[in-house]
Amino acid sequence: MATVKGGFSGIIRQAHKMQQQINRVQDEMADRIVEASSGGGRVTAYVNGRQELINLSIDPEVIDPEEPGLLEDMVLAAVGQAIKNSQEMVAEEVNKITGGFNIPGLL
């Protein structure tokens, strides 16, 4: 069985260091933007690495006062996908730090 250098205190130090690296990555992700479109590119949502919607682009041609549900569906689809893309981007960066291990309490 492998031992960890420094025993339990070494594990705690490594976890603390990993948490600091994850915090740094999360701060950096705030400046990274992902996007997703729906309706053939007529609605595009832009989300940062904190899963905050920062911009929404809507082609005026899809604004039909008689069918608001269509536009609503396109907005929901674009925003939902952009958030998912953002979460995947952050998870990918965190996995680089954790080696793919899901460590409870680090995020």
Image (cartoon, rainbow, N blue to C red):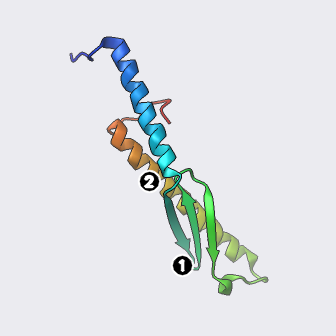
Count of marks placed on residues = 2
Q: Please identify the quadrant where the N terminus is shown.
A: top left
Q: Which amino acid does label 1 sit on?
A: Gly
Location of residue 35 in the rendering, given as x and y in whole percent from the top left corner? 51, 66
Residue at the left extreme?
Answer: 1
Is 59 situated above or below 28? below
Report helix, strand or loop for mark 1. loop
Sequence-earlier tag: 1 or 2: 1
Q: Which of 73 and 33 is in front in this view?
A: 33
Residue receiving disc 2: 89
Give how far across and how far down residue 104 sits, in percent: 47, 30
**Image side of residue 81 versus residue 21, left or right:** right
The residue under the point 52% across, 53% down is 49
Q: Give above or below for 12 relative to 76.
A: above
Mark 2 crowd level (few <14, some 14–19, many ≥20, 10 Å Cα): some
Q: Which of marks 1 and 2 is in front?
A: 2
Q: Which of 4 and 1 is in front in this view?
A: 4
Question: Which residue is at the far right?
Answer: 66
In this picture, residue 13 sits left or right of residue 48: left
Residue at left 78%, top 82%?
65
Q: Residue at x 62, y 74 (%)?
A: 57
Q: Which amino acid does label 2 sit on?
A: Met
The image's mark for residue 41 is: 1
- Residue 22 sits in which quadrant? top left
Q: Position of residue 25 (x, y in %)?
A: 45, 44
Q: Is mark 2 on a helix, strand or loop?
A: helix
Relative to 76, is 16 above or below? above
- Residue 34 rendering spot, x and y as whole percentages: 49, 62
Residue at position x 69%, y 71% from top? 72
User: Against 35, is 105 above or below?
Assistant: above
